[in-house]
Image (cartoon, rainbow, N blue to C red):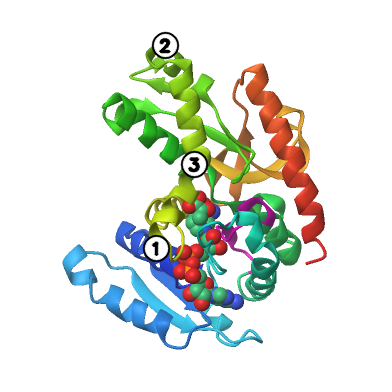
Amino acid sequence: MGKKVTVVGAGFYGSTTAQRLAEYDVFDTVVITDIVEGKPAGLALDLNQSRAIEGFETKLVGVTTGPNGEGYEAIEGSDVVVITAGLPRKPGMSRMDLLETNAKIVRQVSENVAKYAPNAVVIVVSNPLDEMTALTQLATQFPKNRVLGQAGMLDTARFTNFVAEALSVPVKSVKTLTLGSHGDTMVPVPSRSTVDGKPLREVMPAEQIEELVVKTRNGGAEVVALLKTGSAYYAPSAAAARMAKAVAEDSGEVMPVCAWVDGEYGISGVYLGVEAAIGAEGVKRVVETDLDADELAALKEAAEAVRAKQGDIATM
Ligand SMILES: NC(=O)C1=CN([C@@H]2O[C@H](COP(=O)(O)OP(=O)(O)OC[C@H]3O[C@@H](n4cnc5c(N)ncnc54)[C@H](O)[C@@H]3O)[C@@H](O)[C@H]2O)C=CC1
Ligand SMILES: CC(=O)C(=O)O
Protein backbone atom coordinates (compact mmCIF):
# COMPACT_ATOMS: atom_id res chain seq x y z
CA MET A 1 0.00 0.00 0.00
CA GLY A 2 1.16 3.57 -0.69
CA LYS A 3 2.56 5.68 2.08
CA LYS A 4 0.49 8.35 3.80
CA VAL A 5 1.63 11.30 5.91
CA THR A 6 -0.48 13.79 7.81
CA VAL A 7 0.63 17.30 8.71
CA VAL A 8 -1.48 18.74 11.54
CA GLY A 9 -1.54 22.55 11.40
CA ALA A 10 -1.69 24.40 8.10
CA GLY A 11 0.24 27.48 9.19
CA PHE A 12 3.67 28.47 7.93
CA TYR A 13 5.46 25.40 9.28
CA GLY A 14 2.74 22.96 8.25
CA SER A 15 2.17 24.28 4.75
CA THR A 16 5.88 24.39 3.87
CA THR A 17 6.32 20.88 5.31
CA ALA A 18 3.41 19.59 3.22
CA GLN A 19 4.94 21.17 0.12
CA ARG A 20 8.35 19.60 0.73
CA LEU A 21 6.81 16.20 1.45
CA ALA A 22 4.73 16.31 -1.71
CA GLU A 23 7.69 17.36 -3.84
CA TYR A 24 9.79 14.42 -2.55
CA ASP A 25 7.18 12.19 -4.23
CA VAL A 26 7.70 9.34 -1.77
CA PHE A 27 4.18 9.43 -0.27
CA ASP A 28 0.95 8.57 -2.10
CA THR A 29 -0.98 11.02 0.04
CA VAL A 30 -0.21 14.09 2.12
CA VAL A 31 -3.12 15.08 4.38
CA ILE A 32 -3.00 18.58 5.82
CA THR A 33 -5.37 19.55 8.63
CA ASP A 34 -6.19 22.70 10.58
CA ILE A 35 -9.03 24.10 12.66
CA VAL A 36 -9.38 27.05 10.27
CA GLU A 37 -12.30 26.54 7.89
CA GLY A 38 -11.20 26.14 4.26
CA LYS A 39 -7.49 26.81 4.71
CA PRO A 40 -6.21 23.23 4.47
CA ALA A 41 -8.49 22.50 1.50
CA GLY A 42 -7.29 25.67 -0.22
CA LEU A 43 -3.63 24.78 0.35
CA ALA A 44 -4.18 21.23 -0.92
CA LEU A 45 -5.94 22.54 -4.03
CA ASP A 46 -3.13 24.98 -4.72
CA LEU A 47 -0.37 22.40 -4.14
CA ASN A 48 -2.14 19.80 -6.30
CA GLN A 49 -2.15 22.32 -9.13
CA SER A 50 1.66 22.53 -8.87
CA ARG A 51 2.01 18.78 -9.59
CA ALA A 52 2.14 19.22 -13.36
CA ILE A 53 4.92 21.80 -13.04
CA GLU A 54 6.99 20.14 -10.31
CA GLY A 55 6.32 16.64 -11.66
CA PHE A 56 5.18 14.80 -8.55
CA GLU A 57 2.29 12.32 -8.23
CA THR A 58 1.62 12.68 -4.49
CA LYS A 59 -1.96 13.79 -3.89
CA LEU A 60 -2.70 16.39 -1.25
CA VAL A 61 -5.91 16.41 0.78
CA GLY A 62 -6.90 19.30 3.04
CA VAL A 63 -9.31 18.83 5.95
CA THR A 64 -10.70 21.16 8.60
CA THR A 65 -11.01 19.46 11.97
CA GLY A 66 -13.46 20.28 14.76
CA PRO A 67 -13.13 20.56 18.56
CA ASN A 68 -14.58 17.07 19.08
CA GLY A 69 -12.37 15.32 16.56
CA GLU A 70 -14.60 15.96 13.56
CA GLY A 71 -12.69 15.37 10.32
CA TYR A 72 -9.94 13.23 11.89
CA GLU A 73 -11.11 10.13 9.93
CA ALA A 74 -9.05 11.65 7.08
CA ILE A 75 -5.80 10.78 8.86
CA GLU A 76 -6.64 7.06 9.15
CA GLY A 77 -3.83 4.83 7.88
CA SER A 78 -1.15 7.52 8.21
CA ASP A 79 2.36 6.09 8.47
CA VAL A 80 3.66 9.41 9.79
CA VAL A 81 1.98 12.37 11.51
CA VAL A 82 3.81 15.69 11.85
CA ILE A 83 2.31 17.92 14.56
CA THR A 84 2.85 21.61 13.83
CA ALA A 85 -0.35 22.87 15.51
CA GLY A 86 0.17 25.64 18.03
CA LEU A 87 1.17 29.24 18.44
CA PRO A 88 4.58 30.48 17.28
CA ARG A 89 6.65 33.01 19.21
CA LYS A 90 6.37 36.78 18.85
CA PRO A 91 9.43 39.02 19.33
CA GLY A 92 10.61 38.99 22.95
CA MET A 93 8.87 35.69 23.79
CA SER A 94 10.74 32.55 24.81
CA ARG A 95 9.60 29.15 23.54
CA MET A 96 8.61 28.38 27.15
CA ASP A 97 6.04 31.23 27.06
CA LEU A 98 4.03 29.02 24.69
CA LEU A 99 3.88 26.09 27.11
CA GLU A 100 0.35 26.29 28.51
CA THR A 101 -1.44 27.31 25.31
CA ASN A 102 0.33 24.83 23.10
CA ALA A 103 0.00 22.01 25.65
CA LYS A 104 -3.81 22.21 25.34
CA ILE A 105 -3.61 22.15 21.54
CA VAL A 106 -1.03 19.37 21.36
CA ARG A 107 -2.91 17.19 23.86
CA GLN A 108 -6.16 17.50 21.86
CA VAL A 109 -4.36 16.73 18.60
CA SER A 110 -2.46 13.80 20.13
CA GLU A 111 -5.63 12.17 21.50
CA ASN A 112 -7.13 12.23 18.02
CA VAL A 113 -3.93 10.93 16.45
CA ALA A 114 -3.96 8.02 18.90
CA LYS A 115 -7.56 7.26 17.99
CA TYR A 116 -7.39 7.59 14.22
CA ALA A 117 -3.75 6.78 13.35
CA PRO A 118 -2.73 4.33 16.09
CA ASN A 119 0.19 2.91 14.12
CA ALA A 120 1.76 6.19 13.05
CA VAL A 121 5.20 7.51 13.88
CA VAL A 122 4.64 11.00 15.29
CA ILE A 123 7.09 13.83 14.66
CA VAL A 124 6.41 16.79 16.95
CA VAL A 125 7.49 20.32 16.06
CA SER A 126 5.20 22.52 18.22
CA ASN A 127 7.07 24.53 20.86
CA PRO A 128 8.39 24.27 23.48
CA LEU A 129 9.67 21.28 21.57
CA ASP A 130 11.11 18.93 24.17
CA GLU A 131 8.08 19.34 26.43
CA MET A 132 5.54 18.98 23.59
CA THR A 133 7.28 15.78 22.47
CA ALA A 134 6.99 14.34 25.98
CA LEU A 135 3.35 15.43 26.17
CA THR A 136 2.55 13.77 22.84
CA GLN A 137 3.95 10.47 24.06
CA LEU A 138 1.92 10.77 27.27
CA ALA A 139 -1.29 11.66 25.47
CA THR A 140 -0.96 9.03 22.71
CA GLN A 141 0.54 6.34 24.97
CA PHE A 142 2.50 5.26 21.87
CA PRO A 143 5.76 3.38 22.43
CA LYS A 144 8.47 5.97 23.09
CA ASN A 145 10.39 5.14 19.91
CA ARG A 146 7.31 6.08 17.85
CA VAL A 147 7.21 9.67 19.16
CA LEU A 148 10.10 12.00 18.40
CA GLY A 149 10.67 15.71 18.04
CA GLN A 150 12.28 17.94 15.45
CA ALA A 151 14.87 20.41 16.70
CA GLY A 152 18.41 19.07 16.46
CA MET A 153 18.47 18.90 12.68
CA LEU A 154 17.43 22.53 12.50
CA ASP A 155 19.86 23.71 15.18
CA THR A 156 22.66 21.72 13.54
CA ALA A 157 21.83 23.16 10.11
CA ARG A 158 21.99 26.66 11.59
CA PHE A 159 25.39 25.99 13.19
CA THR A 160 26.68 24.53 9.91
CA ASN A 161 25.44 27.52 7.94
CA PHE A 162 27.03 30.01 10.35
CA VAL A 163 30.41 28.19 10.18
CA ALA A 164 30.29 28.02 6.36
CA GLU A 165 29.44 31.72 6.13
CA ALA A 166 32.16 32.73 8.60
CA LEU A 167 34.85 30.78 6.73
CA SER A 168 33.42 31.47 3.23
CA VAL A 169 33.47 27.76 2.41
CA PRO A 170 30.75 25.59 0.83
CA VAL A 171 28.08 24.42 3.25
CA LYS A 172 28.78 20.87 2.06
CA SER A 173 32.34 20.99 3.41
CA VAL A 174 31.11 21.68 6.96
CA LYS A 175 29.81 19.12 9.45
CA THR A 176 28.54 20.22 12.86
CA LEU A 177 26.38 18.76 15.58
CA THR A 178 23.93 20.21 18.08
CA LEU A 179 22.43 18.21 20.94
CA GLY A 180 20.49 18.99 24.14
CA SER A 181 17.29 20.99 24.37
CA HIS A 182 15.69 23.26 21.75
CA GLY A 183 16.09 26.17 24.13
CA ASP A 184 18.53 27.82 26.50
CA THR A 185 20.30 24.54 27.24
CA MET A 186 20.99 23.72 23.59
CA VAL A 187 24.41 22.06 23.26
CA PRO A 188 26.30 22.84 20.03
CA VAL A 189 29.21 20.36 19.86
CA PRO A 190 32.42 21.90 18.44
CA SER A 191 34.45 18.74 19.23
CA ARG A 192 32.40 16.80 16.65
CA SER A 193 32.48 19.60 14.05
CA THR A 194 34.74 19.58 11.00
CA VAL A 195 35.57 21.63 7.91
CA ASP A 196 36.79 19.57 4.97
CA GLY A 197 37.40 16.78 7.48
CA LYS A 198 39.62 18.96 9.72
CA PRO A 199 38.52 19.62 13.32
CA LEU A 200 36.72 22.96 13.56
CA ARG A 201 39.02 23.93 16.45
CA GLU A 202 42.03 23.74 14.07
CA VAL A 203 40.53 26.12 11.51
CA MET A 204 38.70 28.65 13.71
CA PRO A 205 39.79 30.48 16.88
CA ALA A 206 38.04 29.45 20.10
CA GLU A 207 36.44 32.91 20.58
CA GLN A 208 34.89 32.80 17.11
CA ILE A 209 33.55 29.28 17.70
CA GLU A 210 31.99 30.51 20.94
CA GLU A 211 30.35 33.44 19.08
CA LEU A 212 28.82 30.99 16.58
CA VAL A 213 27.67 28.69 19.38
CA VAL A 214 25.79 31.62 20.94
CA LYS A 215 24.43 32.64 17.51
CA THR A 216 23.18 29.08 17.01
CA ARG A 217 21.39 29.09 20.39
CA ASN A 218 19.74 32.37 19.34
CA GLY A 219 19.12 31.21 15.75
CA GLY A 220 15.34 31.01 16.11
CA ALA A 221 15.01 34.26 18.08
CA GLU A 222 17.03 36.15 15.45
CA VAL A 223 14.51 35.14 12.77
CA VAL A 224 11.53 35.97 15.03
CA ALA A 225 12.94 39.45 15.69
CA LEU A 226 13.17 40.14 11.94
CA LEU A 227 9.87 38.56 10.84
CA LYS A 228 7.95 40.10 13.79
CA THR A 229 4.78 38.10 12.94
CA GLY A 230 5.91 34.55 13.76
CA SER A 231 8.85 32.22 13.66
CA ALA A 232 11.10 30.52 11.11
CA TYR A 233 9.67 27.88 8.79
CA TYR A 234 11.86 27.21 5.73
CA ALA A 235 14.75 25.56 7.59
CA PRO A 236 12.43 24.01 10.21
CA SER A 237 10.18 22.43 7.57
CA ALA A 238 13.21 21.09 5.68
CA ALA A 239 14.24 19.28 8.87
CA ALA A 240 10.82 17.81 9.70
CA ALA A 241 10.24 16.72 6.11
CA ARG A 242 13.61 14.90 6.02
CA MET A 243 12.67 13.06 9.21
CA ALA A 244 9.31 12.00 7.75
CA LYS A 245 11.05 10.82 4.57
CA ALA A 246 13.51 8.74 6.61
CA VAL A 247 10.54 7.06 8.31
CA ALA A 248 8.75 6.40 5.00
CA GLU A 249 11.88 4.96 3.40
CA ASP A 250 12.99 3.13 6.56
CA SER A 251 16.40 4.58 5.75
CA GLY A 252 18.11 4.24 9.13
CA GLU A 253 19.68 7.66 8.55
CA VAL A 254 21.34 9.05 11.68
CA MET A 255 19.95 12.49 12.51
CA PRO A 256 19.96 14.77 15.55
CA VAL A 257 16.40 14.55 16.91
CA CYS A 258 14.54 14.81 20.20
CA ALA A 259 14.30 11.16 21.32
CA TRP A 260 13.64 9.18 24.48
CA VAL A 261 16.95 8.59 26.22
CA ASP A 262 17.32 5.44 28.26
CA GLY A 263 20.84 5.14 29.64
CA GLU A 264 22.80 6.75 26.81
CA TYR A 265 25.37 9.29 28.05
CA GLY A 266 24.43 8.14 31.58
CA ILE A 267 21.03 9.88 31.16
CA SER A 268 17.67 8.12 31.51
CA GLY A 269 13.96 8.78 31.38
CA VAL A 270 13.74 12.00 29.41
CA TYR A 271 13.12 13.29 25.88
CA LEU A 272 16.33 15.03 24.80
CA GLY A 273 18.22 16.13 21.68
CA VAL A 274 20.54 13.28 20.67
CA GLU A 275 21.55 11.55 17.46
CA ALA A 276 19.36 8.62 16.43
CA ALA A 277 18.87 6.24 13.51
CA ILE A 278 15.42 6.93 12.01
CA GLY A 279 13.25 4.39 10.22
CA ALA A 280 9.81 2.83 9.90
CA GLU A 281 9.49 2.33 13.66
CA GLY A 282 10.58 5.91 14.42
CA VAL A 283 13.75 5.80 16.48
CA LYS A 284 15.59 2.57 15.70
CA ARG A 285 18.34 3.38 18.21
CA VAL A 286 19.95 6.34 19.91
CA VAL A 287 23.51 6.79 18.66
CA GLU A 288 26.05 7.93 21.24
CA THR A 289 29.01 9.99 20.13
CA ASP A 290 32.20 10.91 22.02
CA LEU A 291 31.85 14.26 23.75
CA ASP A 292 34.34 16.44 25.59
CA ALA A 293 33.87 16.54 29.36
CA ASP A 294 32.34 20.04 29.21
CA GLU A 295 29.98 19.07 26.37
CA LEU A 296 28.84 15.97 28.29
CA ALA A 297 28.28 18.10 31.41
CA ALA A 298 26.20 20.56 29.32
CA LEU A 299 24.14 17.67 27.89
CA LYS A 300 23.45 16.39 31.42
CA GLU A 301 22.45 19.90 32.48
CA ALA A 302 20.08 20.11 29.49
CA ALA A 303 18.56 16.75 30.48
CA GLU A 304 17.84 17.98 34.00
CA ALA A 305 16.34 21.28 32.76
CA VAL A 306 14.05 19.42 30.36
CA ARG A 307 13.19 16.75 32.95
CA ALA A 308 12.00 19.43 35.39
CA LYS A 309 9.58 20.84 32.78
CA GLN A 310 8.51 17.47 31.43
CA GLY A 311 7.26 16.66 34.93
CA ASP A 312 4.91 19.69 34.82
CA ILE A 313 3.38 18.81 31.47
CA ALA A 314 1.87 15.58 32.78
CA THR A 315 -0.87 17.70 34.37
CA MET A 316 -1.45 20.00 31.39
N1 LIG B 1 10.70 22.58 16.64
C1 LIG B 1 11.16 23.58 15.91
O1 LIG B 1 12.33 23.59 15.55
C2 LIG B 1 10.26 24.68 15.51
C3 LIG B 1 9.00 24.77 16.04
N2 LIG B 1 8.14 25.74 15.64
C4 LIG B 1 6.82 25.73 16.24
O2 LIG B 1 5.86 25.19 15.32
C5 LIG B 1 4.55 25.69 15.65
C6 LIG B 1 3.86 26.19 14.39
O3 LIG B 1 4.53 27.31 13.87
P1 LIG B 1 3.92 28.10 12.61
O4 LIG B 1 3.41 27.15 11.60
O5 LIG B 1 4.94 29.09 12.21
O6 LIG B 1 2.66 28.84 13.28
P2 LIG B 1 1.33 29.31 12.54
O7 LIG B 1 0.62 30.22 13.47
O8 LIG B 1 1.66 29.80 11.16
O9 LIG B 1 0.49 27.96 12.36
C7 LIG B 1 -0.02 27.23 13.41
C8 LIG B 1 -1.31 26.60 12.93
O10 LIG B 1 -1.79 25.69 13.92
C9 LIG B 1 -3.21 25.71 13.77
N3 LIG B 1 -3.87 25.10 14.92
C10 LIG B 1 -4.10 25.63 16.16
N4 LIG B 1 -4.76 24.74 16.92
C11 LIG B 1 -4.94 23.63 16.18
C12 LIG B 1 -5.56 22.36 16.41
N5 LIG B 1 -6.11 22.06 17.59
N6 LIG B 1 -5.55 21.46 15.39
C13 LIG B 1 -4.99 21.75 14.20
N7 LIG B 1 -4.40 22.93 13.93
C14 LIG B 1 -4.39 23.85 14.90
C15 LIG B 1 -3.53 27.20 13.61
O11 LIG B 1 -4.84 27.40 13.12
C16 LIG B 1 -2.43 27.61 12.65
O12 LIG B 1 -2.85 27.53 11.28
C17 LIG B 1 4.79 26.77 16.73
O13 LIG B 1 4.53 26.23 18.01
C18 LIG B 1 6.26 27.11 16.58
O14 LIG B 1 6.81 27.63 17.75
C19 LIG B 1 8.47 26.64 14.66
C20 LIG B 1 9.73 26.60 14.10
C21 LIG B 1 10.74 25.66 14.53
C1 LIG C 1 10.69 28.69 16.30
C2 LIG C 1 11.83 27.87 16.62
O1 LIG C 1 11.77 27.02 17.49
C3 LIG C 1 13.04 28.07 15.89
O2 LIG C 1 13.05 28.77 14.87
O3 LIG C 1 14.06 27.54 16.33
Question: Residue 101 got which mark?
Answer: none
- Front-most of 164 and 219? 219
Residue 122 falls left or right of residue 166? right
Distance between the alpha carbons at the discs numbered 1 and 3: 26 Å
248 in the magenta segment = no
Of labels 1 and 3, the one closer to you: 3
Regarding residue 255, the answer to whether it shows in the image is: no
To which quarter of the image does residue 31 belong?
bottom left
Distance between the alpha carbons at the discs numbered 2 and 1: 43 Å
Quick check: is the Cβ at mark 2 less than 8 Å away from ligand 2?
no
- Front-most of 309 and 26? 309
Q: Position of residue 304 (x, y in %)?
A: 77, 39
Instruction: Please give the residue where the numbered disc 2 appears in the rendered image.
Output: 202
Question: Residue 27 got which mark?
Answer: 1
Q: Secondary structure at mark 3?
A: helix
Up/down of 284 relative to 160, above or below? below
Amino acid type, callout 2: Glu
Q: Are marks 3 and 2 in contact (CB under 8 Å)?
A: no
Per the rendered image, the range of residues in magenta is 118-131
